[in-house]
Amino acid sequence: MTTTLRPTEPLQRNADGTQSRRYQVCVNSRPVGGIRLSTGPDGPSVACVSDLHIAEPDRRRGRGTVAVLAAEEIARSWGCRSIDARVPGDAQVALRLATALGYVLRSRNMSKSLDPTPPELPVGTRARPMTEAEYGPWLVHEREEVARSLIGVGVPAEAAYARADQGHARFLPDGLATENTLISVLEHEETPVGVLWLGLWPDTAYVLDVEADARYRGRGHGRALMLLAEAQAVAGGKDRVSLHVFAGNAPAERLYESLGYETTHYNLHKPLF
C-alpha cells in the first residue's frame, strides 16, 4: 500500500511572505487523515508541520511516519532548510513519532485553570507597577534574554534578535501604556527581587516574561512572581494563565509543574539538510 499526500486547498500565500497548505493523507488514494504544512515567524526557510491526524482504523501502521516524511519533502521543495513540529500535550504517540524521526524538543506551552479566589503573596512581598525609568533598561535586558534563550535551542543569532524585536513590537507597541498589559516589579521587604510581564488576552492571561533577580534566586521569589501572575489574572477577569518555557530550563519547568501547570503543546525542530 502507498501512503501519499493530496492537497485539499490551493497554496495559501500571505502578505507577510509566509505560506501554508493542507493535505489529505491517502493510502492508495483512500483518505485516512490530514496534515498541515506552513512557514512562519522564522522566515521562509523554516517550515512547520502541524494538525497531523490519522483515522483510528489506520493508526499504528506507519501512516503518520510516511505523512511527516512526505511533508518534509514538500518543505524541501519550498526551499526550507529546517522544519518545526507542534505536538499537542496529550499526544504522546505523536511526540514519540517526532522524536524517532529526529525532531528535537525546543520548548513547550503550558497552561493552568484558576480558582476565582486569587492567591496571596508571601508575607513581606508586594508588587508595584514598573516605572518609566526602569522600563528602558529592563527592555534591553529582556531582549538579550529572549535572544539568548532562542540561540540556546539552535536559532541563528540574527533570527533570534529579529524574533525578540518582533515580539516587543507586537506586544509592547505603547510601552508601559500598552492596553491589557501589566509589567510589575516584585519587592520583598522593599527590595526589588523580580519582574513579571503579563498580557490579559481575550481567552487567557499570558506570562510573557517572568524573572527573579539573579542575586536573590533560590528564595522563593520565582514562585511568588507566578502567584502574582495568577492574582493579576483573576483580578483581570481571566480563569486561565498560560506561558511558554524553553527546553532545558529545568528549574522553571519544575516550578510550573509544582504549581499545577500542564503542557498544552510541545515544540520540536529538525534540520532538513
Image (cartoon, rainbow, N blue to C red):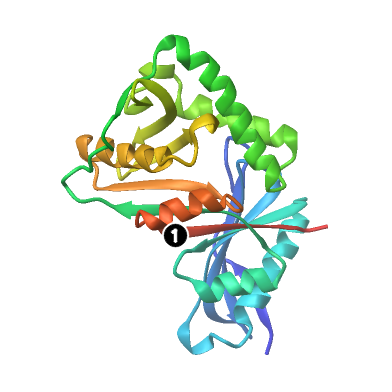
Looking at this view, is 168 or 273 the one in front? 168
Residue at image x 64%, y 83%? 62
Quarter holding residue 30: bottom right
Report whether 237 appears left or right of 101: left
| Up-down relation of residue 241 to residue 89 (above or below) | above
Q: Find residue 76 and report its horizontal and vertical position in percent.
A: 77, 57
Q: How many numbered badges does the structure rendering display?
A: 1
Q: Find residue 80 and report its horizontal and vertical position in percent.
A: 75, 51
Structural crowding at the residue carrying mark 1, measured as other residues with C-alpha within 10 Å and reported as few (<14), some (14–19) or many (≥20): many
Report whether 199 appears left or right of 34: left
Looking at this view, is 198 or 93 the one in front? 198
Q: Find residue 93 and report its horizontal and vertical position in percent.
A: 54, 76
**Residue sticking out furthest to the right:** 273
Residue at image x 44%, y 51%? 255
What amino acid type is highlighted by mark number 1?
Thr
| Up-down relation of residue 88 to residue 11 (above or below) | below
Q: Find residue 24 and report its horizontal and vertical position in percent.
A: 56, 71
| Up-down relation of residue 187 to residue 100 (above or below) | above
Report whether 24 appears left or right of 88: right
Mark 1 lies on residue: 263
The N terminus is located in which quarter? bottom right
Residue 165 in view (yes/no) = no
* Dot 1: element: strand
**Residue sticking out furthest to the top:** 133
Residue at image x 35%, y 53%? 259
Residue at image x 25%, y 38%? 231
